[in-house]
Amino acid sequence: MTQPDPSVRPSGMRSFMVMWVGQFVSLIGSAMTGFAIPIYIFGQTERVRELALLGLAFMLPLILVSPTAGALVDRSNRKFMMMISDLAAGMTTVAVLILVSLGRLEIWHLYITNAINGTFQAFQWPAYSAAISMMVPKEQYGRASGLMGLAENGSGIFAPLLAGALLAVIKLQGILLIDILTFIFAVGTLLFIHVPQPPRTVEGQEGQGSLLRESAYGFQYILKRPSLLGLQLIFLFGNFVASLAFTTLAAMILYRTNQDARIYGLVSSAGAAGGVVGGLIMSAWGGPKRRVHGVLFGWFLSGLVGMTLLGLGQAWPVWAVALFLGALLIPIINGSNQAIWQSKVAPDVQGRVFSVRRLIAWATNPLAQLAAIPLADAILEPAMREGGSLANTFGWLVGTGPGAGTALIFVFGGLIAAAIGLSGYLVPAIRNAESILPDHDQLERVAPAAVAAAE
């Protein structure tokens, strides 16, 4: 295919919006598959273990590959990296479609395709994040992050409803085919936009060297800046308890509704609707003037309403309200955090730094997903059945029977997440991060002659 002349491609905010539309459509397809696959697995096994292992298969390679992926993103053309990562994700969906069409799909196949997806997701997110830093002015970082959150959560509204309604008609094969078509659309939109490469800075020059050295640079960069490290530790511990709980969300709802996929889809869509509202708020507002409040106070509120209230509920209206309110806060939390990092980190090292940043934030997620298996299946679910060892102690709080044990994880996990958010206010390096760190446009850039000499 002949690519459009760069001189007539959209640039700036127009370019971002073209890319955003492509991602929104692609995310709808991905979310439809993400909705259908857990139902397929749970319908065959009726256990949390396989759902947790599916998440682990995605997360572990993503974490392991992230530092090297970030270094390669900074070395390469960022639009090219975005296209390659999107195409790779699409090819895994093609493989699953072929297997299910032949009647040969096994659960272990899904572990492998999820591992491949996780590997290429390690390239996709830093490439997109770093590209946005160059496509929009820094005053618009919060709004751009809000729009990306809007795409993620907007797709979550339509996808469960569409997949829930279509799954019985077009089966898993039809859902996968829709996913593939949306990937093709997303890659096509990238052909029509211009993504500027970042200028070279002194920080970027300091981080140059072998691939191993450049992969390690993201760690060095963050460790030298306690404010950035502290922010990510909030996400490290908060994500652990959130991952521990939400690994069991599908099981909790399906347990308590006799495996009613429609209710699960309705509740999931309510959560996505909250995310859309949060994304709209963030894209129009841009976040609080002191973005750190959006991070810390956001974690506090999301723990209480998005997790504890969810666990206390024993019927779908409460689950829907809790997921709506909790998800409404996520674009504000993530958008505020993203805007801090995009404005403080030099664009030519953002691939490396953002990859390590996410590695820190998600490092404990595999452990949480593994811990969720015995905690739910072997300990809390049996303990919260009628006559179980914890039924009398907590039955008044979350009820008893199937799903009560997983509900208990949400109740206490939410309280811990709220405490983690408040703890950030006790640390000056975190509380005052925005005044301590200079914006990247105040950093020294490398003169063109010096860049040529270095190359």
Image (tube, rainbow, N blue to C red):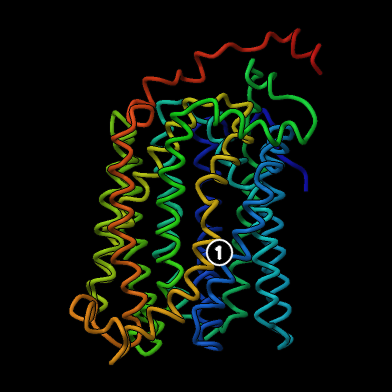
Residue 286 lies in what quarter of the image?
A: top left
Tell me the SS state at disc 1: helix
Instruction: State the count of labels.
Output: 1
Residue 441 % position (x, y)? 51, 17
Q: Nearer the viewer, residue 2 or 304?
A: 304
Q: Is residue 351 left or right of residue 224?
A: right
Residue 416 lies in what quarter of the image?
A: bottom left
Point 49% across, 62% down: residue: 368
Point 40% across, 66% down: residue: 245
Residue 129 % position (x, y)? 55, 39
Badge 1 is on which residue? 30
Residue 10 % position (x, y)? 58, 34
Q: Is residue 181 left or right of residue 379?
A: right
> Is residue 96 shown above or below 55?
below
Which residue ends up furthest to the left in the rendered image?
396
Q: Quadrant location of the C terminus?
A: top right
Q: Is residue 81 left or right of residue 294?
A: right
**Around disc 1, counting alpha carbons within 10 Å, would you say few (fewer than 14), some (14 to 19), or many (20 or more)?**
many
Point 33% across, 57% down: residue: 327
Which residue ends up furthest to the front in the rendered image?
389
Residue 120 % position (x, y)? 68, 53
* Amino acid at circle 1: Ser
Residue 55 lies in what quarter of the image?
A: bottom right
Point 26% across, 63% down: residue: 308
Q: Nearer the viewer, residue 39 or 91?
A: 39
> Is residue 49 shown above or below 181?
below
